[in-house]
Amino acid sequence: MKVTMVGISGSGKTAYMSALYETLGDAGQNEAGFYIAPRSVQQFDKAILSVGDFSRFSLADKLKWPDGTQQTTVWPFTVYHNSRPVTYFDWIDYRGGILTEITDTTDTQEAPDMVRSEITDLASHIELSNAVILVADAFVLTYYPNIKEARHRSGARRIHEIFTTYSRIYPNRNLIFVIMLTKADTVDDKWKTDNYAPLIERGLEVFNQMVSLQKQNPSWEGCIVPVSAVGEGNVHRSVTPTEDIKHPFRSEDKIVGFPQPVNAEHVLFYCLGQTLKQMREEAGKSIRQREKELSEILKQAGLVNKIWSLIMRKPDAESIARAILEEKNKDYEILSQFETHIEPLLGKALERVRQIK
Ligand SMILES: Nc1nc2c(ncn2[C@@H]2O[C@H](COP(=O)(O)OP(=O)(O)OP(=O)(O)O)[C@@H](O)[C@H]2O)c(=O)[nH]1
Ligand SMILES: [Mg+2]
């Protein structure tokens, strides 16, 4: 299964991977009996894609933040349940540049052609993922009183462009998405009451376009959830306003207590549960039809095609499409063994995740 994370640089994607591993990694078998372990993969072409290594990013071991990620990174791991492998994931940390380069400039000029094609590229990448995670910094969301500015600064505006394009070029297609509000520990207490209800409301307001796109697309399933890689009181954050309109404040987060991630596993449970549920509903679709659709998507894509060809180790669109299909069929076998777990998984996720209706 494939999950793609998108979010501007600094929004907390890599810190989240560390939190996920801290929560569900080898030692961290949780009460629901799930855990994850890194999967080894062949070396990729490092110029395009790098492989994330959990041990190098452990917040608990290092007590320091990960370095910025320079290029699209894939985190391959296997999910176990009561010591039996359930499925594997390629969790993809998509190059943040596409969002950051544009969000950093405040002028509202038309996006250049290159950006347009990158957006189309990303839309096809999303089509080939089982679920997408839209990452936005909760502090940024609450720092700017003006909602439009919050939308712009958090990268939500660019994310809206991507999904408006997606919905246009792939009408009637499934989509599972999670709006992940990171660094929830850093927002003012007034946003945290009643299980972060005010923060979630703010998030829905900022991501209003996702909410309305979901209304137009009955086969979309979305949710929103606050997360923290460190938990309450374990980081001391200092915020310094600047005179620079591009970056109105500088922040520093000093880790002062042992990291205890919040809500990290619920995101994975939601993606897994919804994907399995969707597969159950999709089982009837003809393989021929699916193969045709996939190779058409891949033919249109540029960079994305390269990324998948590296992951799949197949040279051309046709064989990547076939490999993806085979993979989906394998996922289906998993589903048949795991069907009874779908509801409990979603039930667990929904303890913390708010579904968007
Ligand atoms: N307080 C707090 N700070 C966080 C948390 N997660 C991330 N941060 C801060 O945000 C910074 C950026 O986080 P990263 O995970 O590196 O961001 P990223 O999205 O991977 O950024 P790129 O790799 O540049 O795309 C970290 O260095 C921390 O200072 C969190 O849960 N709580
Ligand atoms: Mg990163």
Image (cartoon, helix red, strand yellow):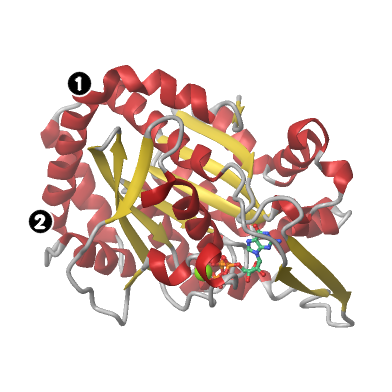
Q: Quadrant of ligand 1?
A: bottom right
Residue 30 vs residue 273, the one in the foreground: 30
* Mark 2 surroundings within 10 Å by alpha-carbon count, few (fewer than 14), some (14 through 19), many (20 or more): some
Marking on residue 26: none
Marking on residue 284: 1
Is label 1's Cβ within 8 Å of ligand 1? no
Residue 116 vs residue 277, the one in the foreground: 277
The residue under the point 72% across, 43% down is 203
Mark 1 lies on a secondary structure that is: loop
**In the image, is residue 342 above or below residue 3?**
above
Identity of the amino acid at label 2? Answer: Ser
**In the rendered image, which residue does mark 2 sit on?**
319
Residue 294 screen position, x and y as percent: 22, 47
Which quadrant of the structure image shows residue 353?
top right
**In the image, is residue 337 above or below residue 182?**
above
> In the shown orientation, is residue 84 left or right of residue 158?
left
Residue 120 screen position, x and y as percent: 42, 59
Q: How many labels does the image show?
A: 2
* Mark 1 surroundings within 10 Å by alpha-carbon count, few (fewer than 14), some (14 through 19), many (20 or more): few
Is there any visible trace of residue 129 in the rendered image?
no
The residue under the point 83% across, 43% down is 191
Residue 43 screen position, x and y as percent: 20, 74
Is there any visible trace of residue 222 in the rendered image?
yes
Which quadrant of the structure image shows residue 286?
top left
The residue under the point 56% across, 26% down is 350
Mark 2 lies on a secondary structure that is: helix
Residue 106 screen position, x and y as percent: 75, 72
Identity of the amino acid at label 1? Answer: Gly
The residue under the point 20% across, 21% down is 284
